[in-house]
Amino acid sequence: MLSSSRISQHLRDCDHHHRNFGLGLGLGLGFCSSRVELLSSFMAKPFSGATIGDYHHRLQRQRMLTSSTTDLGCLKQRKSPCEVPILTDYFSLQEDDHELPSNGLSSVKGGIVALGKFDALHIGHRELAIQASKVGTPFLLSFVGMAEVFGWEPRAPIVAECDRKRVLFSWTSHCGNVAPTEFQVEFSSVRHLTPRQFVEKLSKELGVRGVVAGENYRFGYKASGDASELVRLCEEYGMEACIINSVMDRNQDSRNMGSNDLKERGQVSSTRVRHALAQGEMKYVSELLGRQHRLILMVKDQEGFTYSNHSVSVPKSCLLNLPPKEGIYKKCCVLIGDEDPISCRVTIDTTHIYLELDEVGPCIHHVSSQDLPLLGIEFGDSGV
């Protein structure tokens, strides 16, 4: 059973003077205004040659390309020398994959909800899902549309929208053989709710049985509620609440995030993932994510996309999520359609991504097919 007394009694002391800015990009709730992630210049650099507007155009076009397909979000789990699952035809990009249904959000009724924004789906987010799964059906309930509400500059996601189901499915073995289901709520619909009103919404409107959140969890209008208040209000409304300790970054002592936040204690966060990608530290990225980083590119009808028997060249304008910094990456794999992954070396420059294949598979001849819009690159632990 979830216990309302399971609140952290202390914070681990660290000598760091930075923390994860962001509305719940680490373990906190999605609309905590005290955790606004800085828009660092290194975020934009990997997207040289493609504007943010281009990125959003690609995402919309990708949805249009796949909207007429059946559910293709599941992945075949064949093993290969690269030890990664492979892509199945496309990814499902139907809007209702990640959005709450309109019928009163009844799909989460009776479930245990983990609260956060879940940008990176890193090991801290996974821990929330694990704790939820110990008590009931696990859900991830996150809040979207904050950039539009606050006027933030849009930026590329760490996990491509079309790849989120695969990542959540990979958590199945950690979550009692159940893959967590993700739902998203428009931030504008809850922005002005007080802490009490928010918990009341969870109880009466969603029918949630319990919630799981991190110890730094803040919620309600202007982030006025904390983890202790969440527990108290959940008790009042007949729900259970579990507050868990932050998952700490084992490499925290050697990392300087450049943040000015004195409360940063070294927890795993989406900010750390972005920083590691910007540094090209792929082993560190894998440790934070609990998996290898997968880059997704839309190659359908793209100018500048070329291939031969042993090489592929893709312009950065094809990117659907955040790549690592410019440089050469060894021990990677390229995933194309239903074929087994092919090991390769990846070179990233200011405008293109180049793949040097270690072998020639039949999949390379289908790259230009009109029926294959997406290409995946799985990065190994070899950094720049």
Image (cartoon, rainbow, N blue to C red):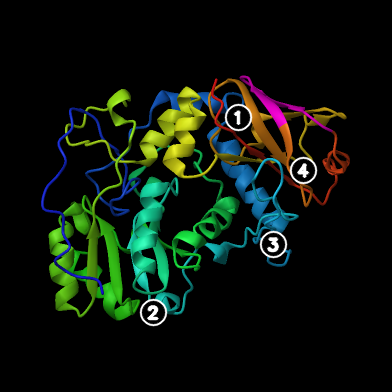
Q: Give the camera-side residue of 234 and 338.
A: 338
- Spatial CA span between label 1 and label 4: 16 Å
> What's under tag 2, amino acid-wise?
Lys
Q: Is residue 326 above or below residue 31?
A: above
Marks 4 and 1: in contact by CB < 8 Å?
A: no
> What's under tag 4, amino acid-wise?
Lys
> What's under tag 3, amino acid-wise?
Leu
Query: How many marks overall?
Result: 4
Secondary structure at badge 4 equals loop
Residue behind mark 2: 109
Residue behind mark 3: 72
- Spatial CA span between label 2 and label 4: 39 Å
Q: Which mark is residue 300?
A: 4
Q: Give how far across and how far down residue 49 sits, in percent.
A: 61, 24
Q: Which quadrant is the C terminus positioned in?
A: top right
Is tag 3's residue or tag 2's residue first in the polypeptide sequence? 3
Q: Is residue 72 above or below residue 125?
A: below
Residue behind mark 1: 50
Q: Quadrant of residue 166?
A: bottom right
Q: Give how far across and how far down residue 107 sits, in percent.
A: 45, 77
Q: Is residue 345 magenta?
A: yes
- Spatial CA span between label 2 and label 1: 42 Å
In front: label 4 or label 3: 3
Q: Which residues are magenta?
A: 344-359
Secondary structure at badge 3 equals loop
What predominant SS class does the magenta segment belong to?
Answer: strand
In front: label 2 or label 1: 2
Secondary structure at badge 1 equals loop
